[in-house]
């Protein structure tokens, strides 16, 4: 498996969700991942969700979506700081994968979300968040954790994974609630 971005934490299937291309891809053969690349992937995933959360905070039609966006922005800002602080402590310079399409994919997802009508934004955003967090969880489990060499980095990623699960479940529950 080859992370061509982990605008979410490594790479798996590009998933179209409500017209929003998912930023995580999966391809093969798999290049070797080192901790510097994993730190960059971790950082990119958090940055992406900070940006999508901020967009939902601004464009969400329901207060619940705006609040969820604010929570994503806050949570991922804190987690990104933890990752950056650990990288500095370990002397690891984040190095994105050579074939990283993450920035391009994230830009496309943001463009699609910005283009969504007011009426469609909340569901498009929530569907994107469910798919995004599922891809992150899959990537962490299948690709990143097995490749991490440093015990502190592995511990951080392991401790953060349940929060990604929580965000995915919360987005799914909110999507279902708003669809009623």
Image (cartoon, grey):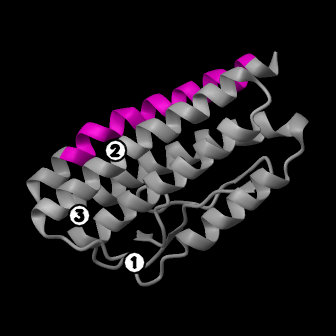
The picture places residue 127, in percent across and down from the top left corner, at: 69, 39
Residue farthest bottom in this picture: 98
The image shows residue 102 at horizontal and vertical percentages of 54, 69
Residues drawn in magenta: 156-177
* Of labels 1 and 2, the one closer to you: 2
Per the image, the residue denoted by label 2 is: 79
The reply to whether residue 134 is in sight is yes
Residue in view at x 66 percent, y 36 percent? 57
Q: Quadrant of the N terminus?
A: bottom left
Which quadrant of the view contains residue 125? Answer: top right
| Mark 3 and mark 1: Cα distance apart in space | 14 Å
Asked if the residue under mark 3 is in contact with the one under mark 2, i.e. CB atoms within 8 Å, the reply is no
Residue 169 lies in the magenta-colored region:
yes
- Specify whether 122 is left or right of 128: right
Q: CA distance from mark 1 to mark 2?
A: 21 Å
Question: Where 45 sits versus 26, above or below?
Answer: above
Residue drawn at 54 percent across, 61 percent down? 24
> Circle 3 sits on which residue?
147
Q: Earlier in the sequence, mark 3 or mark 1?
A: 1
| Quadrant, the C terminus | top right
């Amino acid at each position: 498996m080859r992370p061509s971005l982990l605008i979410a934490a490594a790479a798996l299937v590009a998933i179209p969700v409500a017209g929003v291309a998912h930023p995580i891809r999966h391809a093969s053969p798999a290049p070797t991942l080192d901790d510097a690349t994993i730190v960059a992937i971790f950082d990119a995933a958090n940055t992406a969700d900070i940006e999508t959360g901020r967009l939902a905070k601004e464009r969400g039609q329901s207060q619940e979506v705006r609040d969820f966006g604010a929570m994503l922005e806050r949570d991922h800002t804190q987690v990104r700081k933890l990752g950056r602080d650990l990288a500095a402590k370990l002397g690891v310079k984040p190095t994105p994968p050579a074939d990283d399409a993450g920035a391009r994919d994230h830009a496309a997802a943001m463009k699609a979300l910005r283009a969504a009508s007011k009426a469609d934004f909340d569901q498009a955003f929530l569907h994107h968040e469910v798919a995004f967090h599922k891809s992150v969880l899959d990537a962490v489990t299948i690709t990143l954790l097995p490749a991490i060499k440093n015990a502190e980095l592995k511990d951080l990623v392991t401790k953060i994974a349940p929060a990604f699960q929580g965000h995915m479940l919360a987005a799914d529950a909110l999507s279902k609630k708003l669809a009623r």
